[in-house]
Every structure is written in C-alpha cells, then in structure tokens.
Image (cartoon, grey):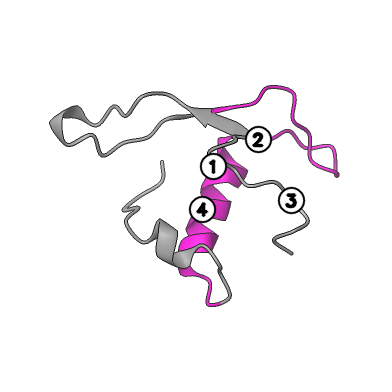
Amino acid sequence: MAAVGDKLIEVDAKLAGSSPPNGGSGRLSLMMKLRPGVIFHDGEPLDAEPVRFNIERDKTASYSRRKSELAPVKSVT
C-alpha cells in the first residue's frame, strides 16, 4: 500500500512542505503547510485531520514501515 500514495514530506516534498522549526530553543516543533487543492479519490479535501491520523497510525501500526523514523514524534496536533 505504501507505493499507492505520496509521502507526506521528504526531501522532495509532494503533499506538504514545512516552515522553519518553531519549538523555541529546543526546536522540537514542525509546522507543515499542506499543498492547496489536493483532493482524495473520494472527493474529500486533504486537511490536517487525515494528516494527523496517518502520522499516528504510522507511529503505532505493527505493519508500519515508518515506525522507526516517527519514533521521536511525541504528539501530533
């Protein structure tokens, strides 16, 4: 299933870019700016809720290929 959809962010951002880290002196936050006009196959727009859901799922699902890279993420808001 991973080959079916685009990654959310990476060096060559597809669906989201990011602003500079904004977590104070520790720089522990990342704000993503979603690409405007992205629509899912069912007609629903890409917004923060499916992004949050997918990050949380990839952090916890036993089958996740992104579990280790998302391990440092403490929360998604």
| Residue drawn at the location 68% of the way across and 35% of the way down | 46
Marks 2 and 1 sit apart, C-alpha to C-alpha, by 8 Å
Residue 10 marker: 1
Please give the residue where the numbered disc 4 appears in the rendered image. 55
Which is nearer the N-term, disc 4 or disc 1? 1
Marks 4 and 2 sit apart, C-alpha to C-alpha, by 16 Å
Are circles 4 and 2 on residues that touch, CB within 8 Å? no
Please give the residue where the numbered disc 2 appears in the rendered image. 14
Circle 2: residue type: Lys
Circle 4: residue type: Ile
Marks 4 and 3 sit apart, C-alpha to C-alpha, by 14 Å
In the rendered image, the residue lying farthest to the left is 25
Which is nearer the N-term, disc 3 or disc 2? 3
- Name the image quarter holding the C terminus: top left
Q: Position of residue 38 (x, y in %)?
A: 74, 30
Instruction: Between label 4 and label 1, give the one nearer the viewer.
Output: 1
Q: Position of residue 65 (x, y in %)?
A: 56, 67
Are circles 4 and 3 on residues that touch, CB within 8 Å? no
Circle 3: residue type: Gly
Look at the image and give the residue range highlighted in magenta.
33-62
